[in-house]
Amino acid sequence: MEDVKGRVSEIGEGIQSALGEAGREVRSALQREGLTEATIPDAFRKVPKLISPGVHRWLDVAVTGYFAVLGTVFAIRGRGRSAAAAFVNAGMVGSVSALTDYDGSGRKPISFKLHGTLDAAQAATAALGPAMFGFADEAKSVFFYGQAVDELAVIALTDWEAGMPAARRRRAA
């Protein structure tokens, strides 16, 4: 039994280490492109902040579910390209959400502000998905375009500072 406990603990430590490394790699890739975790969230700093980190977390769950259901419906109807685009978006939102430190505790590798920048990448993926997967001229593309617009509204209305550790929050001018 002690062997099992030790092995489970070892696996948990390995996962935690891998998640930390993944977060560092994402930050590094963004910096190489001239982006920081605050690039996108700070672009909307003058917009009223109506969405808290907790509400944003639930919106992420809803968007993941939306794309997962959309992908399933498209797959059942034999629309493989549309299904693939939906599943890519579900995977993006779900993965980033699972790794996001919504409450600023430092327990997860993606800060809440970096999540905002990654949300912009997901909005672009949703908007470009119909063209990339070859169904931009079909009616079903509206599901992707609409969600991309919704995502931009959520980015603009989210209080990104509230999800950051107190020591890193921007001082009000």
Image (cartoon, helix red, strand yellow):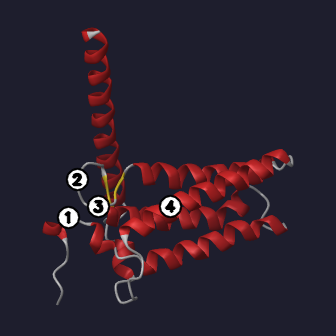
Tag 4: amino acid: Asp
Task: Tell me the number on the disc at residue 69.
Answer: none
Task: Tell me the number on the disc at residue 106.
Answer: 2
On screen, residue 85 above or below 170: above
Would you say 48 lies left or right of 66 here? left
Label 3 crowd bin: few (<14), some (14–19), many (20+), radius 10 Å = some
Q: Earlier in the sequence, mark 2 or mark 1?
A: 2
Question: Can you tell which quarter of the image residue 82 is in?
Answer: bottom right
Would you say 73 lies left or right of 112 here? right
Q: Earlier in the sequence, mark 4 or mark 1?
A: 4
| Residue most extreme to the left | 167
Identify the image quadrant of the C terminus.
bottom left
Task: Tally the numbered discs.
Answer: 4
Would you say 41 lies left or right of 71 here? left
Residue at mark 3: 103
Q: Residue at x 25, y 10 (%)?
A: 2
Q: Are marks 2 and 3 in contact (CB under 8 Å)?
A: no
Q: Are marks 2 and 1 in contact (CB under 8 Å)?
A: yes
Which mark is nearer the camera, 2 or 3? 3
Residue 11 at x, y = what percent?
A: 32, 24
Label 1 crowd bin: few (<14), some (14–19), many (20+), radius 10 Å = some
Residue at mark 1: 165
Tag 1: amino acid: Pro
Residue 108 at x, y = what percent?
A: 30, 49
Residue 86 at x, y = what percent?
A: 67, 54
